[in-house]
Amino acid sequence: MSTLSTSLPGGIWTLGDLTVTRFGYGAMQLAGPGVMGPPADHDGALAVLREAVHLGITHIDTADAYGPRVTNQLIREALHPYSDSLHIVTKVGATRDEQGGWPPARRPEDLRRAVHENLENLGLEVLDVVNLRLGDAQGPQPGSLAEAFETLVDLRRQGLIRHLGVSNATAEQVAEARSIAPIVCVQNMYNLAHRQDDELIDELAEQGIAYVPFFPLGGFSPLQSSALSAVAARLDATPMSVALAWLLRRSPNILLIPGTSSVAHLRENVAGAGLSLSDEDLAELDKIGR
Ligand SMILES: NC(=O)c1ccc[n+]([C@@H]2O[C@H](COP(=O)([O-])OP(=O)(O)OC[C@H]3O[C@@H](n4cnc5c(N)ncnc54)[C@H](OP(=O)(O)O)[C@@H]3O)[C@@H](O)[C@H]2O)c1
């Protein structure tokens, strides 16, 4: 296991045998509008990725569905050859259609192809962590993941994947995955205002499994709440900083992957997540999503 010390807010976490900073970076926002096509500012996108690594971030979240292929190719262009401390987490199980939709692609042949394409686009021999992306754009949907997850377990056995996770999953699907093979993370939608996974987060924390909220800042519609604004104003901070600091405080197994296409926002988010929240602040923020 690598050792890593960091001055980033939140410190470190281990995904299996991989040490990552709890403050990571989500690359989805680097693709064009609607997460389709190339970014308007190619060099700006490369600069964001390089700044993330420069700031000490060692966890980047991505997928070939972003663009499609665009964010993985940007990551490769900006950062390859990768430093040993950098861990790229990708996901398979959804593809893109011409309208920008996200149809599922979870047949064994889809998943095998997706793993090979991720390896190629990222320029890697082994993928550090692969999440099986379940459900649909409306959120998690019930149903067995066995066939799809077993396909990934097989690809891991072949040496193409180090660790597995699930995404957009119900608690039952998380349990089903764990009955088949160990997982190191669950990546679901969660933030101050959307707390449907509170119980799952606590359970995973007890098991040493990371919970990685997507849309930590609200995603395509930024978090808005009068209570959040009031706490932010009192602390002379931005609502984004409060939202990130709250997630780091919420549970030690929460890893942040806020997305941004801006170097300035990236720096702001890293600095802001270190904000210290009082018990009074927490009590007030706790009411938002309850
Ligand atoms: N598993 C899944 O199904 C799934 C689904 C969605 C996302 N994800 C992953 O989760 C990551 C995070 O989600 P996300 O990027 O969609 O949403 P997010 O992190 O909640 O929010 C990103 C949005 O916030 C804005 N933003 C960030 N920092 C800001 C700041 N300091 N001030 C003002 N605006 C700021 C960004 O705009 P700017 O670009 O202008 O900064 C962007 O529009 C993604 O990058 C992706 O890797 C996974």
Image (cartoon, rainbow, N blue to C red):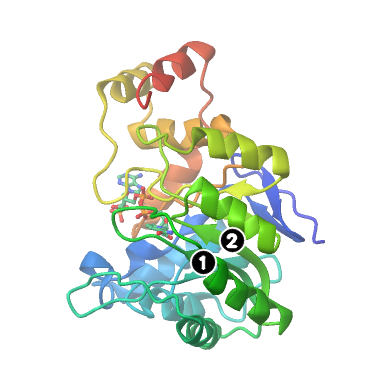
Q: Of residues 5 and 54, which is closer to you in this image? A: 5
* Rendered residue at 54%/75% (across/down): 79
- Give the side of residue 238 with respect to residue 226, left or right: right
Whether residues under marks 2 and 1 lie with C-beta atoms below 8 angstroms apart, the answer is: yes
Q: Residues within 10 Å of mark 2 (few under 14, many from 20)?
A: many
Residue 56 seen from this side: no
Q: Tell me if residue 112 comes above or below residue 216 in the rendering.
A: below
Position of the N terminus, as image quadrant, is: bottom right
* Rendered residue at 38%/28% (across/down): 237
Q: Which residue is mark 1?
A: 132
Q: Residues within 10 Å of mark 1 (few under 14, many from 20)?
A: many
Position of the C terminus, as image quadrant, is: top left
- Give the side of residue 84 with respect to residue 198, left or right: right
For numbered disc 2, what is the local secondary structure?
strand
- Give the side of residue 45 with respect to residue 119, left or right: left
Residue 29 quadrant: bottom left
Residue 170 seen from this side: yes
Q: Tell me if residue 205 comes above or below residue 72 in the rendering.
A: above
Give the residue type at disc 1.
Leu
For the residues marked 2 and 1, what is the alpha-carbon distance in whole angstroms? 6 Å
Residue 101 quadrant: bottom left
For numbered disc 1, what is the local secondary structure?
strand
Q: Of residues 284 and 133, which is closer to you in this image? A: 133
